[in-house]
Amino acid sequence: MAKPRPAKRILDSYTIKGSNKTIKPGDCVLMRQPDSSKPPYVARVESIEAGSRGSNVKVRVRWYYRPEESIGGRRQFHGAKEVFLSDHYDVQSADTIEGKCFVHSFKNYTKLDAVGNEDYFCRFEYKSATGSFIPDRIAVYHPACIDMTVEEAKKLEHFFCQSCSSQNEKKTEDSHSASRQLESKVESKRRRR
């Protein structure tokens, strides 16, 4: 007769090893990469569970992708601290959590007095299997491309930079051939630990 599987306990919180920081479902965290030369992964904790004796703590996370991790790659208008909330969920060991971070809306991010290492912003959701975004487009403004000040551009009802638009169309065409190659690799972005 097979042994019954030990029951899992849902936890309200977890204290990150080696720190006094506590995380709860809904918090954003930095998770260790296998390659220590790369920045940590960013994820939102969906739930925390432990084995019946309180050991072997696991977190169910929803991954944020950096622009360079997406099928289209990093574009000129992506911010240095921008991440995309993906539809990619995973279960990881809580031991891989390096620390807490904060993912703000773009509007709230621009209002921060000081941006810390743990601050990021998100303005897109990313569908990891298809490489599509929600919303699928945003307005991008480059007033300097046509010798206009930011103040002058703000007075316009619609502003489109023709120079940058044609460059982005070319990049989009190039990225479609790259995405066909990437689509053949439909494996998990993160390895379980």
Image: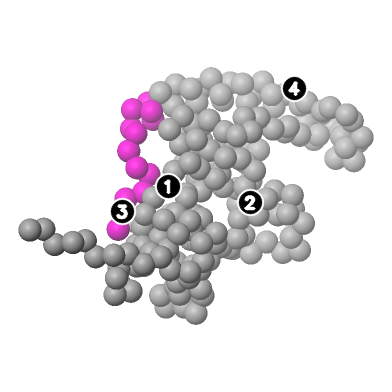
First of labels 3, 1 by sequence position: 1
| Residue corresponding to mark 3 | 192
How far apart are labels 2 and 3 at the CA level?
Answer: 26 Å
| Amino acid type of the residue tagged 3 in the rendering | Arg
| Residue corresponding to mark 4 | 162
- SS for dot 3: loop
| Amino acid type of the residue tagged 4 in the rendering | Gln
Structural crowding at the residue carrying mark 3, measured as other residues with C-alpha within 10 Å and reported as few (<14), some (14–19) or many (≥20)? few
Q: Residue at x 64, y 33 (%)?
A: 135
First of labels 4, 1 by sequence position: 1
**Image quarter of the N terminus:** bottom left
Res 137 quadrant in image: top right
Q: Residue at x 49, y 79 (%)?
A: 20
In this view, the mark in front (2 or 3) = 3
Expressed as whole percent of the image width and height from the top left, the position of residue 85 reads 54, 45
Expressed as whole percent of the image width and height from the top left, the position of residue 116 reads 64, 64
How far apart are labels 2 and 4 at the CA level?
Answer: 27 Å
- SS for dot 4: helix
- Secondary structure mostly seen in magenta is loop
The residue segment tinted magenta is 181-193
How far apart are labels 1 and 2 at the CA level?
Answer: 19 Å
| Amino acid type of the residue tagged 2 in the rendering | Phe
How far apart are labels 4 and 1 at the CA level?
Answer: 38 Å
| Residue corresponding to mark 2 | 121
First of labels 1, 2 by sequence position: 1
- Label drawn at residue 50: none
